[in-house]
Image (cartoon, rainbow, N blue to C red):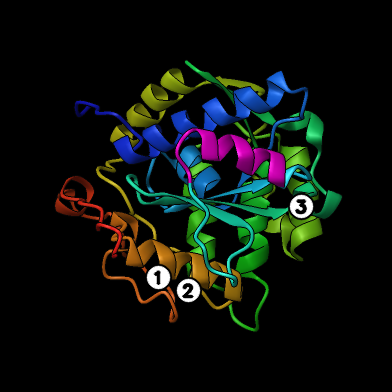
Amino acid sequence: MPATSPSLRAEYREAIALIARAVAALERRNIRSPILVGGAAVEFYTGGAITTGDFDFVTPYREEFFEELERVGFRRPGQGEISRALFHPSSGISVEVVSGQLMDGRADNERLVVVRLRDGALRVIPIEDVIADRIGQALAGSRIDERMRNQAIRLYQLAGGVDRSYLDRRIAEEASDGHLWRHWRHGVVRIIDFENHERELAARKAALGFSGYDHVMRNDGARRTPEKRAILRELKRMGSPFLEGVDVDEGMGNVGLSSPEAQHNYQPRKKEG
């Protein structure tokens, strides 16, 4: 078996550590912690086979969450069109609150994964819901979206275990072809240690012959909201390495931190004026 290396990018690990500190402060205020969803959850579950530059969360406590994020170095963009996101000037990432209810109430909150880190813990959407969401997006149009389908496949390939009955139900709710996935095996993960998760994913990726990051094309941007586009434009203006070679108005494709140079040569742009 090939030698393994850290599965998740250093930039991702640094971002998660910062966000965990903010979440820990929220919990000390007796405010329920937000839930990580979207592309950052996909990156977590695939160990960087699919990467992102924006971290999406679900919480009804956006302002309280933003207060704690600002205390660990995140900043508001100062643009009227971006009201739901903060940016970290040195790391080139953003945090956005996308809604107050997980998967419009369809996901089972009892299945949330708790990721333990040194400075706190994060709640993450279950992998079954992420797979179902990607399949739902793949089948949303008149033709299958191959990017989303391939993301769902890669998520399953790298999963440590899925609950087949729950996955089937969630796919049936998000899409119409749940029967295509009934061969998936049974299993469930409740609590994950971040460092153990990295080591296990690195071993799975090595066994499958994967190396580096961005093996699977990202979404094509067709369903990206105006606010999401504005967030990505701001990240690109900051010189974020996550958006190298990306036309944020046309879609991402298989770009981003796909080369070691893009991952390690990031120099954030100085703020003008």
* Residue carrying label 1: 252
Residue at x-position 76% and y-position 66%: 176
Sequence-first disc among 3 and 1 = 3
User: Where's the C terminus, which quadrant?
Assistant: bottom left
Horizontal arrangement in the rendering, residue 12 relative to residue 82 (left or right) = left
State the residue in front, 17 or 141. Answer: 17
Q: Is residue 195 visible?
A: yes
User: Where's the N terminus, which quadrant?
Assistant: top left
* Residue carrying label 3: 103
* Residue carrying label 2: 220
Q: Is residue 62 magenta?
A: no
Residue at x-position 17% and y-position 48%: 260
Tell me whether the residue at label 2 lies in contact with that at label 1, contact meaning CB atoms closer than 8 angstroms.
Answer: yes
How far, Cα to Cα, is label 2 from label 1? 6 Å
Q: Main secondary structure of the magenta part?
A: helix
Which residue ends up furthest to the right in the rendered image?
105
Instruction: Give the image location of residue 109, x and y in percent.
Output: 80, 35
How far, Cα to Cα, is label 3 from label 1? 24 Å
